[in-house]
Image (cartoon, rainbow, N blue to C red):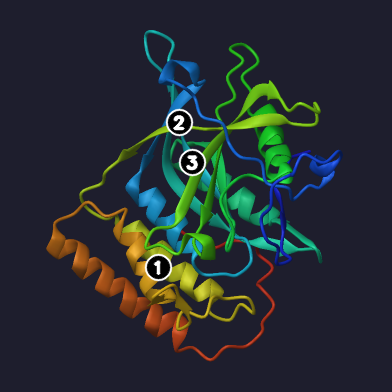
Amino acid sequence: GKVRPKRNVQKREGFYGDGLVGYDKDPFTLVPVGYYAQAKDAPFTVEIGSDALLVMEFHAHLAYTEIIGLLGGRFLKDEEGQGKLKVEYVFPCRSTSTGTQCEMDPASEVAARELFGQKGLDVVGWYHSHPTFEPQPSIRDIENQTSYQDLFRNEASGDEPFIGFIISPYNQEYANDRSQIQCLHISKKWSTTNQYRLPFACIQQIEQQLQINQDVLAAFLNLLKEYKDYENKIDMTLSFGSQSRLDKLISSLKVHLHMSPEDNESFLENIKQMVQQHFIQHPTQTTVQPSDGTINSLS
């Protein structure tokens, strides 16, 4: 059957194994990523559009629990055989909770695959958030990522064109205007205990989009409507560092904008008003998420 990432929904702090025997049996231990010395050492490079980063960034800022989504794109090889994974589209997915864990809603996954197929894209990755702690993968994240890479492996070439993004918007130890964002792939090297393969940071380039696609605004609005009554929604009026969480969101989005300064400010002001109207001022109430599993995003 299909392998779907499982997410932990209980509040937890990130921590590293301290060298004690057996520490890496805890599935929520964080593992620092390795770094390739040069591009040729990596299995492929990653190119992602700034619009895709905007949607992931926005999604991650809305909930105290971990969010999840899929990435659509293409895997290409040049004449010298060097691979490039291009991320062209982001599909925010709904999660289904099973108590201590949540996983991607099957209907969301089906909807994402159908939309990618209509656009001539493949599933090339997934993303999730570490809301309040750093974006190093946990052992469970590594297991999920490895399962996906196995699922998408090209047996003829050995390529595993599937990546993972982790976004950390509210890490108090990194109280900054920017979020921490990690893009990773699991290498063929094993941990010293042979329990899991080691994660490495991808070598990536940002494709700077000079105009914002209208699909991005549509995705923002749909996400606001999806999370406005969620019991674990972020309170945007609370402070984060020296600013409100709403201002933190706006500052983080600005990092991914490449229009003129005037257009950037106009876009951000529009988003700020959208959040105030559809997310902050709405009366909070606990509701059950709809059962169809789809979030109308980027469509």
- Going from N to C along the chain, the mark reached first, 3 or 1, is 3
Q: Is residue 26 above or below residue 239?
A: above
Per the rendering, the mark at residue 16 is none
Mark 2: amino acid? Arg
Report, in whole angstroms, how far the alpha carbon at label 2 lies from the one at label 1.
Answer: 29 Å
Mark 2 crowdedness (10 Å alpha carbons): few <14, some 14-19, many ≥20: some
What residue is rendered at 80% in x and 63% in y? 100
Task: From the top left corner, tell me how far across and down residue 292 is, in percent.
Answer: 66, 65
Image quadrant of residue 245? bottom left
Q: Quadrant of the N terminus?
A: top right
Q: Give the residue at the far bottom of this rendering.
A: 283
Report, in whole angstroms, how far the alpha carbon at label 3 lies from the one at label 1.
Answer: 24 Å
Q: Give the residue at the far right of this rendering.
A: 22
Mark 3 crowdedness (10 Å alpha carbons): few <14, some 14-19, many ≥20: many
Regarding mark 3 in the picture, which secondary structure is present there? strand
Q: Label 1, on which residue? A: 249
Task: From the top left corner, tell me how far across and down residue 95 is, in percent.
Answer: 67, 61
Q: Is residue 148 above or below residue 288?
A: above
Q: Are marks 3 and 1 in contact (CB under 8 Å)?
A: no
In the image, taking residue 178 as reference, residue 122 lies left or right, namely right
> Quick one: 13 or 145, which is closer to the camera?
13
- Going from N to C along the chain, the mark reached first, 2 or 1, is 2
Q: Label 3, on which residue? A: 72
Task: From the top left corner, tell me how far across and down residue 157 is, in percent.
Answer: 58, 12
Mark 1: amino acid? Leu
Q: Give the residue at the far top of this rendering.
A: 80
Mark 1 crowdedness (10 Å alpha carbons): few <14, some 14-19, many ≥20: many
Mark 3: amino acid? Gly
Q: Label 2, on which residue? A: 74
Q: Is residue 155 above or below residue 5?
A: above
> Quick one: 284 or 197, which is closer to the camera?
197
The answer to whether any part of residue 151 appears in the image is no
